[in-house]
C-alpha cells in the first residue's frame, strides 16, 4: 500500500519519516529553547552588538507555552507536506521542497552553534537526525527516479517558505495564547461579581 506511484520512494519511511525526524528535532527545541534563551541572551547581546535590540527583546520574551503551540502549528504543516509526499509517491514538489528546507535548516543550526561557539537548541539533533535523514530520503527518492533537481533557486525558495511558515506559526501561537489570556481574564471578572 505504501508503494503507490514511486516504487521504493513512496514508502512511509521516506515521506512520513520527514514528520518523525522533524518531531525528534523540534522536541529538543521545545524542551530547551526558552530556558537557553533566558540564560544566554545577555551574553549574546554583548558578543553581537550589531543585532537589533528588538531581536534581543523578542528572544527574551519567548514563552515556553507559546513556543510549544507554534511548534504544534508547524507540526500540522509538516504532517500535511509528508502526506502529500506519500500520496504522490514522493513526487510532490511541496514535499521535496520541505525535505530540502529541513536539511538546510539543520545546517543553519550548526552554523548558529559555530557562531556562538557552543550549544544552541537544535544543534544536537541536526547532525544526528536532520541532516542524515534528509540525505537518506533524498537518496531513496533519487534511486526511485522521482527526485527533482535541487537548484539554488529552489533551495532559497524552500528556506524562504520555511521561514514564512515559522513566522506564521508563531503569529498563530501568539493569537491563541492571547485568546486564552483574554478568556482567563473574562472568567475571573465574571467570577468576581
Image (spheres, rainbow, N blue to C red):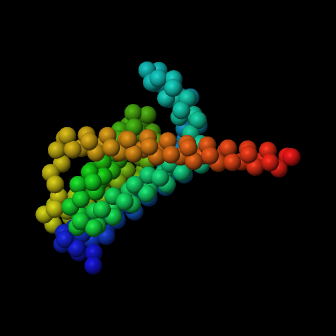
Place of residue 189 in the rendered image (x, y in percent of width and height, measured from the top left): 79, 44
- Examine the rendered structure and indicate whether residue 54 appears above or below residue 114: above
Q: Residue at x 46, y 46 (%)?
A: 169
Q: Measuring 47% from the left and 23% from the top, which residue is drawn there?
A: 52
Instruction: Determine the image quadrant of residue 89.
Output: bottom left
Quadrant housing the N terminus? bottom left
Q: Residue furthest bottom?
A: 1
Tell me if residue 141 can be seen: yes
Taking the spot 57% from the left edge, 34% from the top edge, the residue there is: 60
84 horizontally vs 59: left or right: left
Query: Could you tell me residue 139's position as x and y percent?
Result: 20, 60
Q: Residue furthest right?
A: 193
In the displayed structure image, the side of residue 18 where residue 55 appears, left or right:
right
Tell which of 6 and 113 is nearer to you: 6
Q: Is residue 135 visible?
A: no
Q: Residue at x 35, y 45 (%)?
A: 162
Pinpoint residue 142: horizontal percent, then vertical percent. Answer: 16, 61
Left or right, residue 110 beside residue 184: left
Amino acid at each position: 500500500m505504501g508503494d503507490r506511484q514511486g516504487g521504493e520512494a513512496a514508502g512511509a519511511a521516506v515521506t512520513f519519516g520527514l514528520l518523525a525526524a522533524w518531531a525528534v528535532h523540534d522536541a529538543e527545541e521545545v524542551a530547551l529553547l526558552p530556558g537557553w534563551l533566558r540564560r544566554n541572551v545577555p551574553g549574546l547581546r554583548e558578543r553581537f552588538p550589531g543585532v537589533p535590540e528588538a531581536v534581543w527583546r523578542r528572544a527574551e520574551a519567548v514563552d515556553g507555552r507559546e513556543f510549544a503551540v507554534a511548534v504544534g502549528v508547524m507540526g500540522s504543516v509538516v504532517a500535511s507536506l509528508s502526506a502529500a509526499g506519500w500520496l504522490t509517491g514522493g513526487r510532490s514538489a511541496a514535499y521535496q521542497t520541505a525535505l530540502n528546507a529541513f536539511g538546510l535548516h539543520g545546517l543553519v543550526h550548526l552554523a548558529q552553534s559555530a557562531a556562538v561557539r557552543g550549544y544552541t537548541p537544535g544543534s544536537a539533533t541536526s547532525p544526528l537526525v536532520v541532516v542524515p535523514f534528509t540525505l537518506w530520503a533524498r537518496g531513496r527518492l533519487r534511486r526511485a527516479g522521482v527526485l527533482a533537481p535541487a537548484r539554488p533557486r529552489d533551495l532559497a525558495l524552500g528556506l524562504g517558505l520555511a521561514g514564512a511558515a515559522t513566522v506564521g506559526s508563531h503569529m498563530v501561537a501568539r493569537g491563541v495564547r492571547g485568546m486564552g489570556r483574554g478568556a482567563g481574564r473574562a472568567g475571573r471578572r465574571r467570577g468576581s461579581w
